[in-house]
């Protein structure tokens, strides 16, 4: 095994304005991101909404075709969306969504929906599919007696379990979980996070876990990347990034996260203003319009990700050495 | 289901009779018998004879055959082709969309009757022509409806999910998209059939549809018109048949749509509102008087199965300039309690008991008029979703000014100036320009700031904020919480903060009320409660928070529904410490400034 399961190199995604008469600049949702996810590894992606987390997830899954850079899965470039090779690859990747309500089809039984992957990718008989389905239900903590029920009969936490079961039915190698617990109560969040951790361990899943809840990422993931306006600001092993956040944006994010014991967190840094529009990002460091350490030279070049402290911990800030 | 049964039976009966016409012991519908012309009754002809002495009942039934055949055939053809085009257009967009939708628009440009006349004149009258004309006429409706539905369905996560599973396009379209657009298409079918029956009759009436002597309802009306004075009943029968058929069709399609729609919920439950107010049997508040004093607050809702209590015996006190947080999982009654205090309960719910005194005045027993004067004045509320509380068609500055003028008589210009000052006060940069923006032009955080500006416009003494930051990013949340803390400090306002984030409680509140299944399970100063939680639920909630070093632990199960509360301790089914003693409802006990509702708290905290 030479290369990690999923490798993204300088991947980019620009959404062109839609429609025949549409005008205006494209939205650069992801602007040159390098990321890898090894087998059995969980990579966290954090950042404010609109920072490009979901877009990155869809690029790694090949649900979106990148407008720049490359994504490889298991050593192969991702095939064109919609092609036969692409469809076959779907069995090896799964996605779990944030909204426990919108992500399930209200008009089909949960059994039929969780079964979809098997029906599409295998030649199993109905009875064999049913057997696998039952096993999957038990695995995610749902009652297999209720295969014939409709989504509205389930609570938010149970629906997320259903979403997970659907994504894992074909026994994929790679799972993208896009804010899977953000809409849940904290008591239920912990259940679902625990389930994901178990599944990851038992099935050897590679996982991309998108979240804006930093403490959850800390518990579930091995590494984390911090995104702002489509770019990576900081990346590294969770223990290091959370213990020594070194990019001003990561520090602001962590300091804003409410904690049971406020004395334990960094002094609150309120970010001034609003994030700039991704159609017109600032030159140089994209964070400079809200960074309290910004200098004129921050506007000149895009700061590259550089090793900071250890080989795996990298920070994209030209002043990282001075301010830490 | 019952709603489906009745119209289905009628439509079924009509179709069945029409279909079985050749087998029924009917007279020949075209045999003329001039001797019995216009006879009101002839043995064997209970509805009489028409102007050529033909049997009316037989013609009615045979007429149903041709009318319905034309209507169903044209609706079905239009539905199949139109839905397919709409589906493909909505899914693939691009050229297919242009062709399908613009094509439909062209057809829609013609007045329907004119188009029908044109085609019939070109092709000559007859059943085939009629079906062709009607299908073309109804096609655009189906294309447009299904196109719009597909557009909205394709953006949904569950469609993305099947796509992510690698389903082929036909499978996605047939299995996932089609069932989700079936409801509106069915309604369209009902409209098309009903209107096709009418149009068929109309065209036949004009002599452009079914060709005599084949019976059809339109032709019958045409014939009866000439002899309207001598035999008015001849006009009545086909009209009656038409009306009943159309009504039944519409009812049926409505019902089918409801049944096909498995989204659940269905219609809102019908609730009975019995208004009986119990007098408050509570001691007068102890001095010094708190800003807000809530005691025994109980809210009831009558539902089909009985009465549920989403808030049960809630009590707390809030002093001016302080923050009290109400926490608990969703479904524990937090928002219902807040709306009860504000007098904003939904119509089905009512306050069954309790008092809520704002500076000594009971809000719950005050006339609505007086309470309205307080709302937005002395007390104000901020909701989770600012978008649904702001009016999308008015500029935000005007909305803030409106909030001012609702309570104070100030000239418009002054109100606008104050509105800008308020926007500035809540930390909106460039407030003059932002005041002219519409809500959708602002980010979520900014909209929440506007809501707060409206809430504090008249310097309220009490502000209730219901999950004000739940939908926001942590960075924005931090800024909003800071703003609330500052306002409270500087204006001496009392703040009730409803949240499900214990971290937020720890950051901003001095006192906390933990609610579970409508009841207070624990209450006290935040430092004390978080350092030494007495109730197993509080402990479990704290253990679920992921920000310590320990692995977060979930709480098994979910909050039970209000009609399924356990008879004893409501937390018992999820409590790790439940024993037989927990089968009796525990009282709320006061201990050193803290209150706890658990029979085992003493042994557990030992
Ligand atoms: N299909 C799309 N078309 C146009 N713009 C998009 C599309 N999807 C996302 N974007 C834009 O890309 C940016 C990043 O979005 P997203 O990846 O959803 O961020 P996140 O998941 O971090 O909230 C946002 O500005 C968003 O509006
Ligand atoms: S490069 Fe400059 S602007 Fe960017 S984070 Fe570092 S100090 Fe701030
Ligand atoms: S009363 Fe019993 S079941 Fe309820 S919280 Fe206390 S120990 Fe648990
Ligand atoms: Mg997202």
Image (cartoon, grey):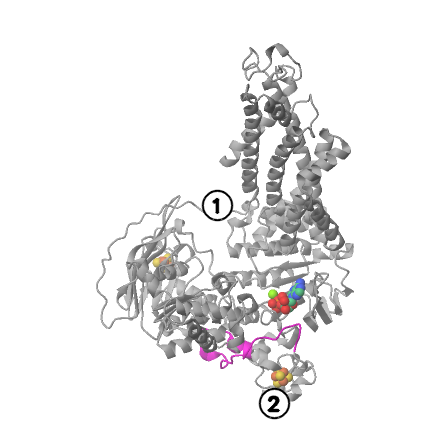
A106 over A322 or under it: above or below: above
The residue lying at 39 percent from left, 49 percent from top is: B563
Q: Which range is magenta?
A: A252-281
Mark 2, residue position: A322
Between the residue at mark 2 and the residue at mark 1, the CA separation in whole angstroms equals 63 Å
Which is nearer the eye, B21 or A308?
B21
Find out whether residue A257 is within the magenta segment.
Answer: yes
Coordinates of residue B330 in the picture (x, y in percent)? 45, 59
Q: Does any portion of residue A95 appear in the rendered image? A: yes
Coordinates of residue B73 in the picture (x, y in percent)? 68, 33
Find out whether residue B131 is within the magenta segment.
Answer: no
B507 over B242 or under it: above or below: below
On screen, residue B13 versus residue A15, left or right, reads left
Say which of marks 2 and 1 sits in front: 1
Mark 1, residue position: B267
Circle 1 chain? B
Which is nearer the eye, A22 or A297?
A22
């Amino acid at each position: 095994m030479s290369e990690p399961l999923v490798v993204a190199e300088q991947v980019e995604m620009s959404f062109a304005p839609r429609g025949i008469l549409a005008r205006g600049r494209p939205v650069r949702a992801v602007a040159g991101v390098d990321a890898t996810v090894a087998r059995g590894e969980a990579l966290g992606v954090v950042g404010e909404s609109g920072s490009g987390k979901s877009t990155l997830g869809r690029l790694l899954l090949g649900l979106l075709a990148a407008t720049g850079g490359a994504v490889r899965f298991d050593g192969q470039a991702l095939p064109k969306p919609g092609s036969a090779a692409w469809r076959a690859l779907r069995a090896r990747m799964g996605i779990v969504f944030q909204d426990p309500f919108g992500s399930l089809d209200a008009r089909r039984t949960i059994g039929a929906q969780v079964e979809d992957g098997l029906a599409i990718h295998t030649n199993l008989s109905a009875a064999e599919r049913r057997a696998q389905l039952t096993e999957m239900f038990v695995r995610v903590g749902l009652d297999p007696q209720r295969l014939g029920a409709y989504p509205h009969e389930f609570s938010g936490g149970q629906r997320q379990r259903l979403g997970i079961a659907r994504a894992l039915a074909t026994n994929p190698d790679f799972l993208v979980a896009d804010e899977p617990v953000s809409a849940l109560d904290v008591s239920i969040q912990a259940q679902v996070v625990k389930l994901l951790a178990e599944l990851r361990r038992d099935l050897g899943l590679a996982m991309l876990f998108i979240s804006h809840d930093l403490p959850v990422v800390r518990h579930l993931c091995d590494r984390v990347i911090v995104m702002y306006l489509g770019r990576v600001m900081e990346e590294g092993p969770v223990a290091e990034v959370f213990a020594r956040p070194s990019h001003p944006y990561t520090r602001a994010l962590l300091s804003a996260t409410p904690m049971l014991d406020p004395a334990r967190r960094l002094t609150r840094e309120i970010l001034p203003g609003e994030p700039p529009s991704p159609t017109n990002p600032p030159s140089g460091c994209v964070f400079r319009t809200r960074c309290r350490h910004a200098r004129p030279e921050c506007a000149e070049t895009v700061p590259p990700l550089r090793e900071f402290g250890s080989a795996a911990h990298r920070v994209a800030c030209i002043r990282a050495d001075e301010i830490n | 289901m019952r709603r489906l049964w009745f119209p289905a039976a009628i439509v079924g009966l009509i179709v069945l009779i029409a279909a079985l016409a050749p087998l029924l012991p009917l007279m020949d519908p075209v045999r003329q018998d001039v001797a019995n012309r216009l006879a009101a009754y002839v043995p064997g002809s209970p509805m009489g004879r028409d102007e050529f002495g033909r049997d009316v009942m037989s013609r009615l039934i045979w007429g149903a055959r041709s009318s319905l055949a034309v209507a169903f055939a044209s609706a079905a053809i239009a539905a199949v082709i139109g839905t397919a085009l709409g589906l493909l257009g909505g899914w693939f967009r691009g050229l297919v969309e242009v062709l399908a939708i613009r094509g439909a628009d062209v057809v829609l440009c013609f007045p329907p009757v004119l188009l029908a006349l044109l085609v019939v004149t070109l092709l000559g009258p007859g059943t085939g022509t009629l079906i062709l004309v009607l299908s073309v006429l109804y096609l655009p409706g189906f294309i447009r409806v299904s196109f719009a539905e597909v557009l909205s369905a394709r953006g949904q996560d569950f469609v993305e999910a099947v796509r992510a599973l690698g389903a082929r396009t036909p499978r996605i379209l047939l299995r996932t998209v089609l069932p989700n657009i079936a409801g509106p298409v069915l309604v369209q079918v009902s409209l098309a059939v009903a209107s096709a029956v009418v149009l068929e009759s109309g065209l036949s009436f004009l002599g452009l549809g079914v060709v005599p002597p084949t019976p059809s309802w339109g032709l019958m009306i045409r014939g009866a018109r000439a002899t309207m004075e001598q035999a008015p009943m001849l006009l009545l029968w086909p009209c009656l048949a038409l009306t009943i058929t159309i009504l039944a069709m519409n009812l049926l399609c409505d019902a089918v749509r409801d049944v096909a729609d498995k989204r659940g919920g269905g219609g809102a439950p019908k609730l009975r509102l019995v208004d009986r107010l119990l007098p408050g049997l509570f001691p007068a508040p102890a001095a010094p008087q708190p800003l807000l004093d809530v005691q025994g607050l109980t809210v009831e809702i009558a539902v089909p199965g009985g009465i549920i209590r989403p808030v049960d015996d809630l009590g707390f006190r809030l002093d001016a300039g302080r923050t009290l947080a109400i926490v608990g999982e969703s479904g524990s009654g937090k928002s219902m309690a807040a709306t009860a205090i504000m007098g904003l309960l939904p119509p089905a719910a009512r306050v069954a008991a309790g008092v809520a005194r704002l500076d000594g005045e009971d809000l719950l027993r005050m006339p609505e008029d007086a309470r309205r004067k307080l709302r937005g004045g002395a007390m104000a509320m901020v909701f989770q979703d600012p978008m649904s509380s702001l009016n999308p068609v008015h500029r935000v500055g005007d909305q803030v000014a409106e909030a001012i003028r609702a309570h104070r008589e100030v000239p418009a210009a002054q109100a606008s100036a104050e509105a800008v000052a308020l926007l500035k006060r809540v930390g909106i940069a460039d407030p003059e320009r932002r005041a002219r923006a519409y809500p959708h032009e602002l980010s979520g955080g900014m909209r929440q700031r506007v809501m707060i500006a409206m809430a504090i416009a008249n310097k309220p003494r009490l502000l209730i904020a219901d999950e004000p930051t739940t939908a926001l990013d942590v960075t924005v949340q931090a800024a909003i919480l800071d703003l609330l803390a500052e306002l409270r400090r500087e204006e001496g306002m009392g703040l009730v903060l409803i949240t499900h984030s214990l971290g937020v409680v720890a950051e901003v509140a001095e006192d906390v009320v933990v609610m579970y299944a409508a009841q207070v399970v624990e209450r006290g100063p935040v430092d004390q409660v978080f350092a030494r939680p007495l109730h197993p639920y509080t402990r479990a909630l704290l253990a679920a928070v992921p920000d310590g070093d320990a692995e977060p632990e979930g709480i098994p199960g979910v909050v039970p529904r209000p009609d399924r509360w356990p008879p004893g301790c409501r937390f018992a089914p999820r409590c790790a410490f439940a024993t037989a003693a927990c089968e009796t409802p525990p009282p709320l006990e006061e201990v050193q400034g803290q209150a706890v509702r658990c029979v085992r708290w003493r042994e557990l905290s030992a």
